[in-house]
Structure formats: structure tokens, C-alpha cells
Amino acid sequence: MITAEDVLELPASSRIDPAARQPLQVGSTISVSVVIPAKNVAAYVAETLASALAQGEVGEVIVVDDGSTDDTTAIVRTIRDPRLRLISNDSAGVSAARNLGARHASGQWLLFLDADDRLRPGAVGALLAAARGAPRAVLVYGDYNTIDSEGRQIGRRDMLKGRRKPSGDVLARLAAGNFIVNGGLALARAEAFRAIGGFDVSLRYCEDWHCWCRLAAIGEFEFAPKLLLDYRLHTANTMNAAVRTPQDFFPAIARVFDDGLIMARLPVGTAAGLRRAAEVHLVTYSAMQAVRFGRYRDAFAYLGMIGRRSLKSLPRAAARIALACFGI
């Protein structure tokens, strides 16, 4: 049962920028709201916004500035589109920024787009088409490719033709590792997102994975097998900064496996094994990122961490790490 404490709270420090907020058209129905948390992303935010506003199915784009000290807000204000709104969040963090944007969103579906990524043409339409075919889904998601800081393609995920990810009841699979990867390739049903309480503001990393697990505990997911997002990899973004280690991500694992809503829905007796799988997944991810940024000694050390947790998982993890060299 969802309790009152799960309801999303609006931070007292939050405020809407009246100069940038645009009123909705009377009688309009917004299907998709795009929420973009932004902090010091002047180099990318215009491109990100262009990719979101180019999606014909998007009814509004809400930028939540999280205390930028560069020209981020000035750039947002130069874009004249009645669907664009700007909110200030006073450096409360990315989770609080997303929650605030969701609280002000009018759409039936929410898409959380990072301010340095970009949606591919037709991405939202493809997600909505998948949603129409899965009326019970609380989240619909696709796949992504990777680009560098200059916007050049570095990923080779188009080589994985026909790759399928899970649909339906995905909680156990998701608890073993975040196969959603990035909120910019997913539509979350707004009503369900608010019911589970949004993003946990106590988590610094992997807060999206925890949120997706809570959504999976109350409804089904649907996979749309298309590349929908250009996911930017560079040392400035949160998950890929050179100083990140597996230990940074372990608090999220503890949170997932201490969450009453999630634990109540996991099959009896599976939590310990799924937790170990989640640890292997995140250490493997850390090793893949280390390879992508030339930190080969770290990647080798992370392989040792994987082996100590599960020798059975070591060959597959090593293969995934090797593929990272080729952007897959």
C-alpha cells in the first residue's frame, strides 16, 4: 500500500521564474512533459532543448536550474517556445530538481532528460506507440547510443541489431542491475511516479535505478527496441567523472534492498542473490567506464572485485569490459 509519506513534496526553497514560465493553452491536453535538470551546462543545453522541442508529441519542456553560475539560464531564456518553462531549484541536487519539475508537469507521461544528452528524432513518438500497445505499463523505455563531448558518435550499439530487453514484470531483473541506464530514453507514467514518491534525494548516485525499481514494484514495463537517445560520455558528467569508483554506487544498492516496497514484491529467497548480482553489475559498469577513459589499471582492479563476488560472473563481465573498448 502506498502511504501518505510517499507523496512528492515541493521544496520550500523552490520558485518558478515568472519571466520564463509560459502559460498552457486553454483546453490543451499534454501527453508528455520533458523535465531537464540543469546546472552549469551552457555548452550543451541549447542542443538538448532543441532535441526535446523537435519532438512533436512533447507538450511542455520544464528546465529546472539547480544553481547554475554560468550562462545556462540566460541561454534557456533566449529560446522562444510556448512549451518551455524555467524553474529555479537553489542547488538542491539533481533528484530534487527532477522531483520539482515533475510536480509542476502537466503531462500524463514524464521523460527525465539530462541537460547534456539529446533525444533522437522520433524518440517520443516511438515511446508513445509502445505505450499504446501496453496499457498496463508504468514505464516505457528504449535504447541509446553514446556521443562524446563534441557530439560525435562514439557508440556502436547499432551493431546490436535485434537486441531485446525485458518487458512485463521486470522487478527481479531490474534489481539485479539497471538496464534502463538513462531516464532520457524512458517515459514514466506521471501518476505512478508521484505515487512511489519520485527520486530519493538522499542518494547521490544511481537514484534513477532505485526509482525505476520502485516503479517496477507497482506496474509493468515495456521495451521499445530502438535507439532513442544520444547519451553523452565525458569526464564532466556525474556518472563518468574519472574519480567515480564502485564504492560510490554501493549506497544505492543498500537502499534498493532496504526498500519495503521493493522487497515486498521480490520473490521470496531471491534478495541475497539479486543484491550480489547488482554489485557485480555496478562494478562491471565502473570497469567499462574506466576502460573508456583509459584507466586500465582501475579496470583490472575492478575485475578482481567481480571475481571475489562471483567467479561465475567473471567471464561475462570481462567480455562486457572488452566490448567497451569498441563503444558497445
Image: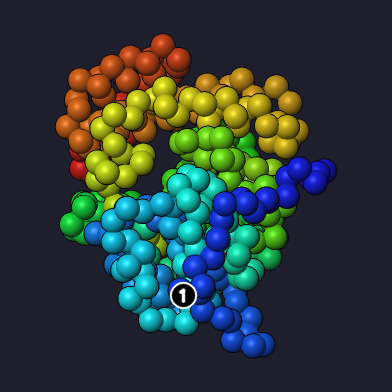
Q: Is residue 20 visible?
A: yes
Which residue is more in the foreground, 255 or 218?
255
Which residue is more in the foreground, 103 or 212?
103
Q: Name the quadrant containing residue 301.
A: top left
Q: Name the quadrant containing residue 162.
A: bottom left
The residue type indicated by label 1 comes to Ala
**Spot occupied by residue 70 in the image (x, y as percentages of width and height):** 28, 56
Could you classify mark 1 by the number of other residues whose Cα lies within 10 Å: few (under 14), some (14-19), or many (20 or more)?
Answer: few
Q: Is residue 283 above or below residue 21?
A: above
Residue at x-position 42% and y-position 27%: 248
**Spot occupied by residue 144 in the image (x, y as percentages of width and height):** 37, 55
Residue at x-position 45% and y-position 16%: 310
Which residue is more in the foreground, 2 or 278?
2
Residue at x-position 73% and y-position 26%: 268
Give the SS element for disc 1. Answer: loop
| Image quadrant containing the N terminus | top right
The residue singled out by tag 1 in the image is: 19
Q: Is residue 85 above or below residue 277?
A: below
- The residue furthest bottom is 26
**Spot occupied by residue 234 in the image (x, y as percentages of width and height):** 24, 45
Q: Is residue 173 visible?
A: no
Q: How is the image coloured?
A: rainbow
Residue at x-position 33% and y-position 14%: 304
Which residue is more in the foreground, 154 or 156?
154
Q: Is residue 325 above or below residue 62?
A: above
Give the side of residue 250 with respect to residue 121, left or right.
Answer: right
**Spot occupied by residue 87 in the image (x, y as percentages of width and height):** 50, 63
Give the side of residue 326 with respect to residue 187, left or right.
Answer: left
